[in-house]
Image: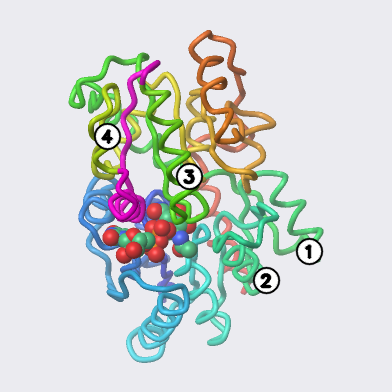
Amino acid sequence: MTKVIHLIAAARPNFMKIAPLYHALSKQDWCTAKIIHTGQHYDANMSDSIFEDLMLPKPHYHLGVGGGTHAYQVGNVMIAYEKICLEQERPDLLVVVGDVNSTAACAQVGAKLHIPVAHLEAGLRSGDRRMPEEINRLVTDAISDYLWTPSPDADENLRKEGHPDSRIQRVGNIMMDSFELLRERIERENAPAQFGLTPGKYGVVTMHRPSNVDEEATLTSLMEQIMAVAAKVELLFAVHPRTRKNLEKFGLWDRLAATSGLHLTEPVSYAPFMSLVKDAKLIITDSGGIQEETTYLGIPCLTLRENTERPVTVTEGTNRLVPTAELQQNVEKVLAGTWITGTKPNFWDGKTADRIVEIIQRMFLEN
Ligand code: UD1
């Protein structure tokens, strides 16, 4: 009998984590992988176009939950996914990825129905419980049966929290598998030219964390810094829907749009976005995934946060945490060619999905 494996996809950063695993599992004859899209992200350019880039099929189940408060999202994802497990199909294994609300919601459904749960990207900790993602990471790891980690710091965090070694497996960073899977397409994409940018001469900006974009004073001072940087190096700002709503609400959108050297655009799909990152002089971001992708590609990354759950990008990679007030002097360092050079962390090699397939197969044989 083939084993059914559910892969939960919910929000933009999840899609590049499930795609390599879906493709690797689909080649096996002992299992059937199915994609469950919770609908947390629903705009075409936050979801559909990324699915297409990653060559993913239409989700096998779509829960259509949409936006809302944390309780609304977690509650509705739990209700909808529990229904699938009880009425349509009970999987033999549930794989949740990353740290979004749907990750913690589906892990809870699986754990309570005694379905084995694996967490891919387990063990990351920012130490900052004001971040909703940190709560999601803690909850998900606490109740998952298998903890698949990307880096040694993650293993260490899990051990400190009392997770036994038998549950922890270092598999590497699956996002790098997505990059390698699409490398040729990304190289052909030539996205900078499509935005009128010259390779090596521009920066890319992304910003969406509630702690940066929800408060008027914080967002205003951040945007003033970005406008000042645009006078020194051309910037492309791919604006997340949460950020756009707030920029419009606080009257900042028109000021940004009128700033020369600053180009505003909708969120960009995976392949063109990686093409933009690969050829950039620098990246200014508060994203988690982009801190890792820039380390992989050796591109300077200026992270506008006080902490990171991905410390290996700072200790080994090209990432630095930068206070808003120090953004300009850090940009100067990049432009002067004095930014740090990094190395690729161990197991960030495009082979994470293969390692996971082996682990799952062994797990089914043993049980
Ligand atoms: C979520 C994740 C975050 C991740 C981010 C990537 C949680 C707690 N947060 O944050 O970890 O880094 O995704 O983007 O799970 N919206 C749209 N269209 C969309 C998606 C969202 O208009 O396709 C709007 C929502 O209606 C809402 C806002 O954007 O007003 C925020 O969406 P939400 O999914 O709640 O959180 P994100 O900020 O995207």
Q: Which residue in the protein does label 2 denote?
A: 142
C-alpha distance separating marks 1 and 3: 25 Å
Along the viewing direction, whichever of 73 and 220 lies nearer the viewer = 220
Name the kind of residue labelled 4 in the image: Pro
CB at disc 3 and ligand 1 closer than 8 Å: yes
C-alpha distance separating marks 4 and 3: 17 Å
Q: Are marks 1 and 4 in contact (CB under 8 Å)?
A: no
> Which numbered dot is residue 161?
1
Earlier-in-chain disc, 4 versus 2: 2
Along the viewing direction, whichever of 20 and 197 lies nearer the viewer = 197
Name the kind of residue labelled 2 in the image: Ala
**What element does badge 3 sit on?**
loop
Task: Say left or right for 315 vs 288.
Answer: right
Earlier-in-chain disc, 1 versus 3: 1
**Could you tell me residue 12's position as x and y percent?**
36, 54
Task: Say left or right for 361 vs 183.
Answer: right
Q: Are marks 2 and 1 in contact (CB under 8 Å)?
A: yes
Name the kind of residue labelled 3 in the image: Ser
Name the image quarter holding residue 72.
bottom left
Earlier-in-chain disc, 1 versus 4: 1
Q: Which residue in the protein does label 3 denote?
A: 287
